[in-house]
Amino acid sequence: MRVNVIEFEPIGRRGECPEDESLLDSARRLDVDIVRLCNGVGTCGRCKIQIVTGEVSPITAKEKEVLTVKETDRNYRLACLTRPLGNVKVHVPPESLTAPQRTQVEGLEIDATPEPSFQSILLEITPPTIEKQTADETGFLAALNRNRNRNQTDSAAAAPGFDLEALRRMPQLLRAENWRARAAIRNNEVIAVEGASTRWCGLAVDIGTTKIAVYLVDMENGKTLASKGLMNPQISYGEDVVSRIYAASRSEESADKLQTLLVEALNESIALLCAEAGVDRLSVADAVIVGNTAIHHLFLKLPVSQLGLAPYVPALRSAIDVKARDLGLETASGAYVHLLPNIAGYVGADHVAMILGTRLAESSGVTLAIDIGTNTEICLNNRGEMASVSCASGPAFEGAHIKHGMRAAPGAIEHVRISDDKPVIQTIGGEAPAGICGSGLLDAAAQMRLNNVMDSTGKILPHPGVRVREDGMKEFVLAERPGREDITISQKDIRELQLAKAAIRLGIRALAEEMGIAESEIDEVIIAGAFGTFIDVESAITIGMLPPLPRERFRQVGNAAGTGARLALISMTERRKATEMASRVRYVELAVISDFNQKFAAASAMTEL
Amino acid sequence: MRVNVIEFEPIGRRGECPEDESLLDSARRLDVDIVRLCNGVGTCGRCKIQIVTGEVSPITAKEKEVLTVKETDRNYRLACLTRPLGNVKVHVPPESLTAPQRTQVEGLEIDATPEPSFQSILLEITPPTIEKQTADETGFLAALNRNRNRNQTDSAAAAPGFDLEALRRMPQLLRAENWRARAAIRNNEVIAVEGASTRWCGLAVDIGTTKIAVYLVDMENGKTLASKGLMNPQISYGEDVVSRIYAASRSEESADKLQTLLVEALNESIALLCAEAGVDRLSVADAVIVGNTAIHHLFLKLPVSQLGLAPYVPALRSAIDVKARDLGLETASGAYVHLLPNIAGYVGADHVAMILGTRLAESSGVTLAIDIGTNTEICLNNRGEMASVSCASGPAFEGAHIKHGMRAAPGAIEHVRISDDKPVIQTIGGEAPAGICGSGLLDAAAQMRLNNVMDSTGKILPHPGVRVREDGMKEFVLAERPGREDITISQKDIRELQLAKAAIRLGIRALAEEMGIAESEIDEVIIAGAFGTFIDVESAITIGMLPPLPRERFRQVGNAAGTGARLALISMTERRKATEMASRVRYVELAVISDFNQKFAAASAMTEL
């Protein structure tokens, strides 16, 4: 039998794939963890992959039931029902990967032409002599002038000033590098001078309340050299931003600590990513950092007490450039950090980055973009007119306030089906069930509703899988664990989820109302963020969290804020777009909409709405 | 008898003065220490004062012998021969004060129109509400726009950016000050936001190798609010800059320490001066700092090793603006420090400030300006063409390397005359002689030459005042001190002085030669610096340190570098002048002039040259 070679993108895993092995089995053998809820029988439809090149077995009838026409047109297949007929290259979309591989750094590829905030210039400096005692800075400027004349650019430009730290490094560097150097010049300021072979990099960071995504990017071609996801260490001051705002407002020490925790985590990431990419941290000549308004303020050590009290205003709305060293970041000598603009106290720079990364502002129809998290921000672009809203969806999706809740980690139940009144579960990494994560909770609730384990008010009904605890609380058993406590979903857990999903749906409805359109007019729903990538959209529709639009109108794009940060990092045009767009987006304050209570109650029904 | 009131300027001392008391005696009674070498008999001519207002006794014949016509025209008198005829106001020129009151902060009054580096703007900000959740920064910018429109200035200017530290302070400040604030905006950057009643100040600093002069200036009217002289604490790393360059080059720790010593001394001075003037350090919105190139580099923590090795080049020649906090200075939130440009490795920003302060660049004739110190820098303006030289004059004038040498402090012999072969001395503060300071050394050498205690080669001759020590060395006794070692000037001391004065004279001659003029063509000699103010010009001419020009061509101006720093502080036009002038001044390297040895030998003769 002939043996073919398979390559999985974007993970970059390669290996042999015999013709009698399904792509799903090849993936498992090569440690590419694709979702396999029905265990490879073609019914769950979760192992969607896209054939990029190569020939594979013809599409099956079962696949035609599960895949949309748009998907088949784009060469989507179910991995469990597809076999290779030669060498193949396969793209695995993020939603088909199990959680540990679907890290928060994944997102859309960036599509902008590099247009950095600085110029990179190679210089040959004439060494000083006793007859011509040229100061190092004077020699540098003369070489710069020669370079500019030669390239006939900026020849009339004023002599640049020097960043002090760059200047401090220069004398030894010029002597060590035999008077050849590469300079980074930004807005007529020399921000870094390094050896002639230096290739400048940049850092894009999306700081979430729970997780941080860090990308090291080549500033010449815009390629991501390395990336990393990590936990936000501020979590020791509270799961949500409100507790952190409270901590920072109460003591200067806590405010300091909340800032340095982030900076230390970023410095560690810079070191790791630079090592991975084989570059020096002194070549990191620019950075773009995004986060929600509170995180943005805590990172800049701006006061946050006014964010925690009505009328909840930010100290800073505009984009700002700050010297990286003023924040304690270890980068190139005089590098700056750019923070994208905020929109409001609870609609921050990460939302702006999400809009940028999804290209939402450029869509001509009616498009909704939604980033689900502890706080969920939603933006509606109604044919060029944009409005955003912020919903306090709470930490249920992160596993908090749920009895058996846990984060998306190995052993977490991430997908649930109820078949013959019995739950079928899939855990992350296929390990023994340890708890339930956000997407599992959503699936479970939807399946409970579809199988009449729960009514449309969210009340758990009598059912073979339901039992009553000693305290009188009803619970649905997801996984029995002999010798250990069973994993269940209780009536209280359902109520927590209900609050979260009602907040989100209310936000969507408020935006539609603000624009005077019906939800059904929405042409596309972009779901951004790591959690949003994991969820089963059908389940979200079933419990009324998302409007019941045709499935092909939904697009799960991964970390769009990270994508937006990378776009703003490599291109000044993108930064300008972000600023222009942030000032154009109307902020809708949910707290002041009319009939809030009735609308919230309506949005909390656990059924298709 | 009627009792009048006298006021001494610029010291600001007031008191009664009976009509039968000389102004000199009144001064002594009121603790204004005017030089009194002949003890009030009108022969030494050192107690010159200027009558500003009021009537005094008619001029005496003795005064007419001592005072020049120019001086009498300007109401100069000898204090010892003048009595009040009513209330009088008297100006005491620095050269008539004994050393402790002639601090290094004295200098010419500044004569430029304030034109600061920043705009001061009063703002009334609209507080945010829940309906209009305006970010603090947005409200600030809106108020700024209203102000600009009202004043019809800069209405088209782009929105300024914020200094991070200024932004951090703003939210609490706006709430505490009821949304009224005063902002300092520099080059479209908000560098400080303080209460509405704030009056912005600035700091001018001249850091000498030995001493530091600090001035706190009102940025609105250019007036000096308070000033202070202090020792340069770097002195613990060596008396001269070469030892400090060596220390900083050898260890990073020493380089750090040399910088922080200066910064701590300046922070202490800022606190003291602000307390004296009754202002907050947060209102210090700008600073100009000057020093020689080595001090300039050590203060900025630029590398200095290349300054200590041929070809002795600075790292930085151009003027530079640095955030005060990047240097550790405690000023207004985002204030900058401006450092004037350097000219060469041993002709620094203090020289540029001296040229600025003396208005040397604006003179149309042939003018020489000289700042005597451990290193002496000289600039010659030959009808618009300028050249500077640096001479290693050594620390003899500071009292170092001289057996009984000491700094200008109480008890130091500061003036000497030989009368009937016996030395007549005056000590600082009239105290028992403790040693001899620079001006005393110069006087003593000149008097020794005039009285044939020494020949024109500097050799001490047999004389009643000369004795031979046990080691065979000749010495001239200045003060006998029964029970303690007598204060003497030895042959070795004379040789030290001879090296110092030869270096200076060689520098003057090299500049004249460079310009192709004779020394006699020099129209004016401006002597700057604290030491230069104390010296007896006749004495300096007698030993050939200065050329034998008519006495009225000399002008002693005090700390001109401090004056230049204050000018650059209050006026951007002056800063531009400094930059333009620094690039125009030709640097003459003494080490490479032809026939150096012969010329140096010729310049070392201890006689009028």
Image (tube, coloured by chain):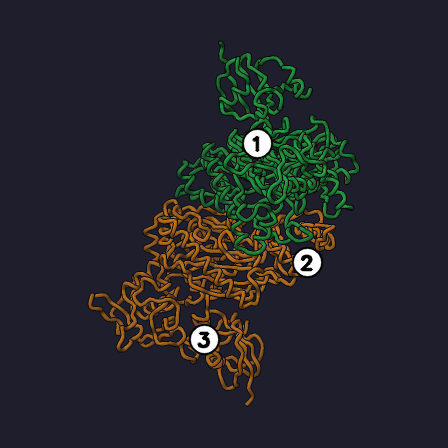
Chain colours: A green, B orange
Q: Answer left or right for A28 relative to A554.
A: left
State the image coordinates of residue A306 (x, y, percent, origin top left): 64, 53
Q: Secondary structure at mark 2?
A: loop
* Residue type for callout 2: Trp
Residue B55 visible somewhere in the drawing: yes
Q: Secondary structure at mark 1?
A: loop
Rendered-image quadrant of the C terminus of chain B: bottom left
* Residue type for callout 3: Asp
**Mark nearer the N terminus (3 vs 2):** 3
Mark 1: few, some, or many residues within 10 Å (few <14, many ≥20)?
many
Chain to which the residue tagged by mark 2 belongs = B
In front of the other: label 1 or label 2?
Answer: 1
Mark 3: few, some, or many residues within 10 Å (few <14, many ≥20)?
many
Callout 3 and callout 2 share a chain? yes
Q: What residue is shown with label 1?
A: A106
Q: What residue is shown with label 3?
A: B33
